[in-house]
Image (cartoon, helix red, strand yellow):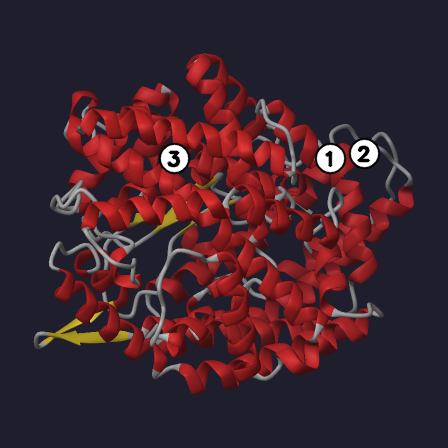
Amino acid sequence: MDFKSLPADEKSILAMTWQDYEPYFNDLESRTLDASNVDAWLDDWSALSSCVDEQFVRLQILTTQYTADEDIQKRYADFIDQIQSPAKTADQRLKEKLLASGLQPGGYAVAFKMMKSESEIFRTENLPLLAEEQKLVTEYDKIMGATTVMWDGQEKTFWEMVTIYWYDPDRSVRERAWRAIEERKYQNRDAINELWGKFMALRSQIAQNTGYPDYRAYIWKQKLRFDYTPEDCKSFHAAIEEAVVPAARRIYARREKRLGLEATRPWDVNVDQFNRPALRPAATVAELNERTLNVFEQVDPQFRAYYQSMMDNGLLDLDSRKNKASGAYSLGFNVARLPFIFMGHTNSAIDVSTILHEGGHAFHTFESASLRFHQKAEQYVPAEFAEVASMGMELLAAPHLSKQFGGYYTEEEVARARIEHMESIITFWPYMALVDAFQHWIYENHEEASDGQRCETKWGELWDRFMQGIDYSGLEKYKNTYWHQQGHIHTTPFYYVEYGLAQLGAVQVFANARKDQKKAVENYRKALALGSTVSLPELFAAAGATFAFDAATLKEAVDLLEDIIAEQEARLS
């Protein structure tokens, strides 16, 4: 068959059916593989996989853009039932065919390891369960997307409330907004706990079908985690408790003193600690795009060119609106070889960190675009390094945020933004440890953790272990249900430690840039271009970092961040 006849435009890709795809899979399966034709076979398989994947990604994006559109939700569900399941089965046969051939095409050593792992956990009987799980994910997104708050007679989205009113210098306004948001989210408690039970039942059955003792053992294989273990994660939690939690307490103590508080309450953690108005980096999406272009140019002119092409091709959905899913992401279109960015603009400092973060993910797609599907697809590039791409970009861009460079802030605002950024990295690590430790507990205690109320109790215990310095007295019911809004726990289990590991790598990239910006950016880009052609530790090394879990490496990172905080505080004095 002529694989060049596969569709290349959005409309044609979205119109594909299983009957359209099946002959291509059959053709690949029927060919005899040898050294003379394996490269051509891989090219064709890559083209086919890219098309199926892009159809899924485009439909997935639409479900988050329009959570209340029933037609879109049906099209997505139909794809899962009618295309994704048979495509996964056919794709598995191709993986087994390639592995059985004994051929070793260049650049596929890591991909082969990943395919072997996927083959070991693949079970046809799990396909309908995985499809059902994706439908539950859509239901979770629907619940969260519909979570709005009535505020002074107007309906506000969750992110509008958070990014506007949580930063209000009037403490009574912040508290009222925080309580309104938390009480509205608490109304989802029964629905999310019921949904949680369904997630857990499905995941238990998926693990049983593969013969693994628990879901964590299954997910470790499914997430292709070859370079670290659950025990390494627990060591990382302990290292964070030792090296980072005290630094986080110092941050909250400084905030208390500057704000003249007896205790830092949850509505005090976002307001400017210097009693200055909240940062407003860009009033409109157009302003945000223009200023982001300028900042990216300062890091590397190629990054500006990449972002400009996204603007030109309609690959940004940045406004905030009702029935748009919460959160932010960047996903790649593997046929178009282009990325897409989704977020909600609110004219707050969160917009800047988010667009820089997702921009890093997008640049990863650009830099690795020439690789074949199985060398670069999201499911094959280790998430622990994919987040170095995003968090590294936040840090590489940090010195260039001022209006002097066409950016978002005055010099005084830059100092405030950078203090917030450095502090947020420190305070994030304990939260990451909380989320990851919670998930380890869940899947080590599957039966107990299938009860949402028992999860609330355990979450509260772990919160008190890691999240020290914030006073939640009298607010325990909100604290204990906070895990309801941490989407990763529900929709992509065990996807969170990656952020903590990657943040440590990103700080190391940033430390290199403080010494030699050009060289650090050059190494960063080279590492992104590798896709998944080398191991996770090798990806870190290519970017100039070390893949680590220990307290000593964390302490070096924390010391650097606290030094920068002190530097920026001096600019405000």
Q: Which residue is mark 1?
A: 40
Q: Nearer the viewer, residue 220 or 448?
A: 448
Q: Nearer the viewer, residue 136 or 333?
A: 136
Q: Which residue reaches farthest left?
A: 153
Q: Which residue is mark 2?
A: 37
Upstream in the sequence, badge 1 or badge 3? 1
Q: Position of residue 565 (x, y in %)?
A: 33, 31
Amino acid type of the residue that numbered disc 1 sits on in the rendered structure? Ala
The correct choice, above or below, for 34 with respect to 159 in the image is: above
State the residue at coordinates (58%, 45%): 242
What separation in Å lies between label 3 and label 2 (alpha carbons)?
43 Å
Q: Secondary structure at mark 3?
A: helix
| Pointers 2 and 1 in contact (C-beta within 8 Å) | yes
Q: Position of residue 107 (x, y in %)?
A: 73, 30
The correct choice, above or below, for 30 with respect to 267 in the image is: above
What separation in Å lies between label 1 and label 3 (alpha carbons)?
39 Å
State the residue at coordinates (75%, 50%): 229
State the residue at coordinates (44%, 57%): 468
Q: Secondary structure at mark 1?
A: helix
Instruction: Check the picture and name the quadrant holding the C terminus.
Output: top left
Upstream in the sequence, badge 3 or badge 2? 2
Which of the two discs, 1 and 3, sits closer to the camera?
3
Q: Which residue is mark 3?
A: 394
Q: Is residue 108 left or right of residue 473?
A: right
State the residue at coordinates (30%, 34%): 418
The correct choice, above or below, for 224 with respect to 186 in the image is: above
